[in-house]
Image (cartoon, rainbow, N blue to C red):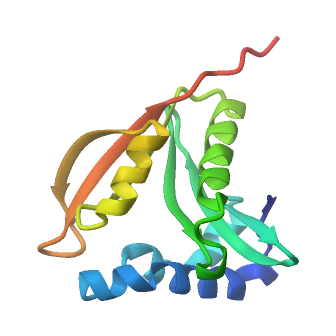
Amino acid sequence: MRLARSDDLGDVLSLTEAAYAPYTALLGAPPIPVTEDYAPRIERGEVWLLEGGGEPAGLLVLERHPDHSMIFSVAVAPAFQGKGHGIALLNHADEQTQLWGLPEVRLYTNAKMERNIALYKEYGFHETGRRPNPYRPGWTIVDMAKTVETIATA
């Protein structure tokens, strides 16, 4: 796992598009992470890449906020799905949240992404609410959160 660099932008875009392709078909439009401008996120140090066999296997976009971290995207390349890479990315989000001394990691997803919601619940997230997507009329956002153990600093 490593922070993405500016020269990784093409890989970040390709991986995101491929990972979210099934949801683009389900939703009738690309999910928000597919349309995101990742260059500023890479510059801010919010994008981590997980590599497998020398190629990008997955990515995590994690924002730091004053009282929590926010997962913007967890994406695993289709060739690497089903091999535990998603859990590794979620574990990294927990670890980074702990290093930042924050008590909670949050995320949001589309209500139609039922498989993802089930996976997040299995990982320890709980649903905190549902709301209309302000950018996509007719879409519903599911907000989720998970408490993490904070690391005591001496």
Q: Is residue 72 left or right of residue 2?
A: left
Q: Quadrant of the N terminus?
A: bottom right
Q: Residue furthest right?
A: 54
Quarter of the image for residue 74 reads: bottom right
Q: Is residue 91 left or right of residue 3?
A: left
Who's the residue at 49% across and 59% down the image? 72
Q: Residue furthest left?
A: 138
State the residue in front, 44 or 10.
10
Looking at the picture, how far across and down is residue 16, in whole percent? Answer: 55, 79
Who's the residue at 30% across and 48% down the image? 143
Quarter of the image for residue 25 reads: bottom left
Q: Residue furthest front?
A: 82
User: Is residue 42 depicted above or below 86 in this figure?
Assistant: below
Who's the residue at 77% across and 16% down the image? 153
Who's the residue at 67% across and 52% down the image? 88
User: Is residue 27 depicted above or below 128 in this figure?
Assistant: below
Looking at the picture, how far across and down is residue 131, in whole percent? Answer: 17, 54
User: Is residue 152 depicted above or below 75 in this figure?
Assistant: above
Looking at the picture, how far across and down is residue 18, in whole percent? Answer: 54, 86
Q: Quadrant of the C terminus?
A: top right
